[in-house]
């Protein structure tokens, strides 16, 4: 099972442009952690945007897949692998302890895994409405409670909150300070774990059921490749 080379190329280009947009071509005048931390924060937000929004948008604009679980698993290997290779070394130019960086990456990875469940389910459908709703769900998983915070009439728990989303976690944890994560930060990770597990617990049996149902409905003379051409 070869890795998707098109996704590797697009992800590499996205990360490269994110690097140029955040770090620039010239180093800062003062080589200190306070100079690099805002750039690392922007780099994380841009990378999260690519993994949580751009990736599902590209996949949901493509033809349905006959093997959505396998294809999504390969996509997740590429996306998660490249993010870890690019973002982890950036901790060296920040004041963050390893625990803080690990928590940021853990919540981000859980958000991507939950998004992968939605992408896998949507890639089994030929309905434009199903794919549009799935993309909306991916957006909600990414931003979490952030829109509600802007318009809520009551005060909500501080960043990062349970089910807050990866963007909220990055904004809360990728700060100039170097303190280790607090108890509520780990609680946010527990909420992200629950969301990812729930998403796959719902989506996995649904995909298996849909594929079995589709096989029974396809004529015996119709090849599996016909499904890919449906739109």
Image (cartoon, rainbow, N blue to C red):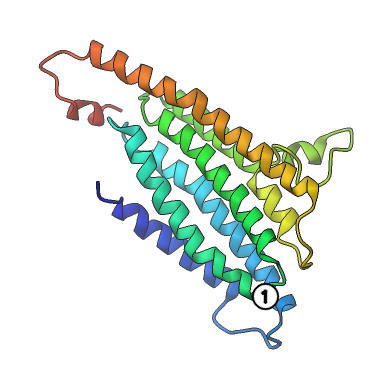
Q: Residue at x 53, y 72 (%)?
A: 20
Task: Specify whether residue 32 is in view.
Answer: yes
Count of numbered labels shown in the rendering: 1
Q: Residue at x 51, y 35 (%)?
A: 135
Q: Is residue 68 above or below residue 1?
A: above
Q: Is residue 129 above or below residue 105?
A: above
Q: Is residue 185 above or below residue 220?
A: below
Q: In this view, does 18 lie above or below 108?
A: below
As helix, strand or loop, the secondary structure at mark 1 comes to helix
Q: Nearer the viewer, residue 114 or 126?
A: 114
Relative to 91, 76 lies left or right: left
Q: Where is residue 79 in the image (x, y as percent from the top left)?
A: 44, 52
The furthest residue to the left: 221
Q: Where is residue 214 in the image (x, y as percent from the top left)?
A: 28, 16
The furthest residue to the bottom: 29
Q: Which residue is drawn at 45% across and 29% down?
A: 131
Q: Position of residue 92 (x, y in %)?
A: 62, 74
Q: Residue under label 1, please give it.
A: 36
Q: Quadrant of the C terminus?
A: top left
Q: Residue at x 39, y 41 (%)?
A: 59
Task: Specify whether residue 159 is in view.
Answer: no
The furthest residue to the right: 154
Relative to 106, 30 lies left or right: right
Q: Residues within 10 Å of mark 1 (few under 14, many from 20)?
A: many
Q: Position of residue 130 (x, y in %)?
A: 46, 24
């Amino acid at each position: 099972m070869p890795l998707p080379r098109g996704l590797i190329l697009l992800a590499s280009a996205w990360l490269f442009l994110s690097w140029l947009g955040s770090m620039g071509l010239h180093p800062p005048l003062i080589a200190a952690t306070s100079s690099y931390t805002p750039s690392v924060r922007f780099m994380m937000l841009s990378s999260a945007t690519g993994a949580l929004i751009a990736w599902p948008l590209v996949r949901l604009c493509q033809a349905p897949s006959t093997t959505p679980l396998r294809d999504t698993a390969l996509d997740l290997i590429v996306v998660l692998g490249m993010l870890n290779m690019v973002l982890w070394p950036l901790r060296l130019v920040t004041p963050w302890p390893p625990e803080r960086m690990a928590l940021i990456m853990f919540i981000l990875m859980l958000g991507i895994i939950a998004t992968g469940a939605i992408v896998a389910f949507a890639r089994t459908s030929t309905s434009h409405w199903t794919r549009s709703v799935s993309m909306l769900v991916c957006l909600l998983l990414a931003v979490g409670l952030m829109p509600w915070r802007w318009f809520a009439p009551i005060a909500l728990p501080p960043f990062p909150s349970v089910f807050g989303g990866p963007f909220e976690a990055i904004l809360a944890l990728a700060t100039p300070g170097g303190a280790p994560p607090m108890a509520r930060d780990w609680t946010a990770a527990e909420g992200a774990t629950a969301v990812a597990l729930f998403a796959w617990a719902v989506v996995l049996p649904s995909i298996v059921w849909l594929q079995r149902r589709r096989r029974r409905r396809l004529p015996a003379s119709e090849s599996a490749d016909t499904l890919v051409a449906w739109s």
